[in-house]
């Protein structure tokens, strides 16, 4: 970088230089987490561009001066807009990334992540992320589900295709968390090895477990899904889905 005419004030006396896992600088790190502290200090400094105090909880993933400054601009634009009486910004569009720090998702976070809305949301809660490649979710089945009017009158049974959809939605959430990609939607592509073993009726709570078995280029995922009620498997399938840009999903 010095040869390119950059970092002219930089040297081994004033900068931390890493080569592999070794520190080349003349002085050792002052703290074991000094690099993290540096990033945190960058965020504090860049947000000071607002020119006013900010009371907030900030979660930063791969931060840098450019994206920190963009955040400051977005916050300032919102403040200026509210001062001028403009309507508040809309909620984040579906396709919001699932943070690596999240261990479960309530229904509000599920709706942040999935594009589906009534009557096609088949996930009520993500109970746990089981490592990097697993997820457990639940779907509460009630008599108020609209499909019970015709499937079947006098003998309500949840359609098997909706159980597959529930597994696909859970797998989509898992892939979004696994890849940590923003503004993406998971589109269901295909299913294989589908089996329906028991009927699902109003009053049942479906436990949905999915495990990612393969990821191709962080765009296509394959997962094994299983739905259970009361500890007994009611359906299972192998699912394939792809990630697309949320802005072009229309």
Image (cartoon, rainbow, N blue to C red):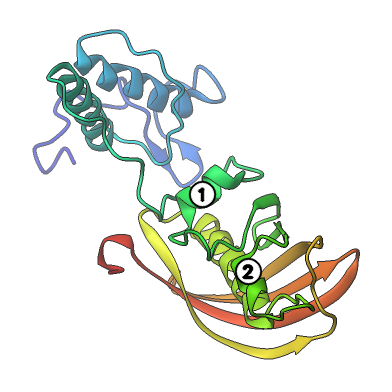
Residue 68, by quadrant, is top left
Residue 183, by quadrant, is bottom left
Q: Find residue 151 and report its horizontal and vertical position in percent.
A: 68, 80
Q: Residue furthest left?
A: 5
Kindly identify which residue carries mark 1. Answer: 98
Q: Residue furthest front?
A: 154
Looking at marks 1 and 2 on the same chain, the residue that comes earlier in the sequence is marked by: 1
Q: Is residue 26 visible?
A: no
Kindly identify which residue carries mark 2. Answer: 166
Quadrant where the image shows the N terminus: top left
Residue 213 versus residue 203: which sits nearer the camera? 203
Quadrant where the image shows the C terminus: bottom left
Q: Find residue 246 and report its horizontal and vertical position in percent.
A: 32, 61
Residue 155, by quadrant, is bottom right
**Residues marked 1 and 2 touching at CB (< 8 Å):** no
Residue drawn at (16%, 37%) of the image: 2
Residue drawn at (60%, 67%) of the image: 146
């Amino acid at each position: 970088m010095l040869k390119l005419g950059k970092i002219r004030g930089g040297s081994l006396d004033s900068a931390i230089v890493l080569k592999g896992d070794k520190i080349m600088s003349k002085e050792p790190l002052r703290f074991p987490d000094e690099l993290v502290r540096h990033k945190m200090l960058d965020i504090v400094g860049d947000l000071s561009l607002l020119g006013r105090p900010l009371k907030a909880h900030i979660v930063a993933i791969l931060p840098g001066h450019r994206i920190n400054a963009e955040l400051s601009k977005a916050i300032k634009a919102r403040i200026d807009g509210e001062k001028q009486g403009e309507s508040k910004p809309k909620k984040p569009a579906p396709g919001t990334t699932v943070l690596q720090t999240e261990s479960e998702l309530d229904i509000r976070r599920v709706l942040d992540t999935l594009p589906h809305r009534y009557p096609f949301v088949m996930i009520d809660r993500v109970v746990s992320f089981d490592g990097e490649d697993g997820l457990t979710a639940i779907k509460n089945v009630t008599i108020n589900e609209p499909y019970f009017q015709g499937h079947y009158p006098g003998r309500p049974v949840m359609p098997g295709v909706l159980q597959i959809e529930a597994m696909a939605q859970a797998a989509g959430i898992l892939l979004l968390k696994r890849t940590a990609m923003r503004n993406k939607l998971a589109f269901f592509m295909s299913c294989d090895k589908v089996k329906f073993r028991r009927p699902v009726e109003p009053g049942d709570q479906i436990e949905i477990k999915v495990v990612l078995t393969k990821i191709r280029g962080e765009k296509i995922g394959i997962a094994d899904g299983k739905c259970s009620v009361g500890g007994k498997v009611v359906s299972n399938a192998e699912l394939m889905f792809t990630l697309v840009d949320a802005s072009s999903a229309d």
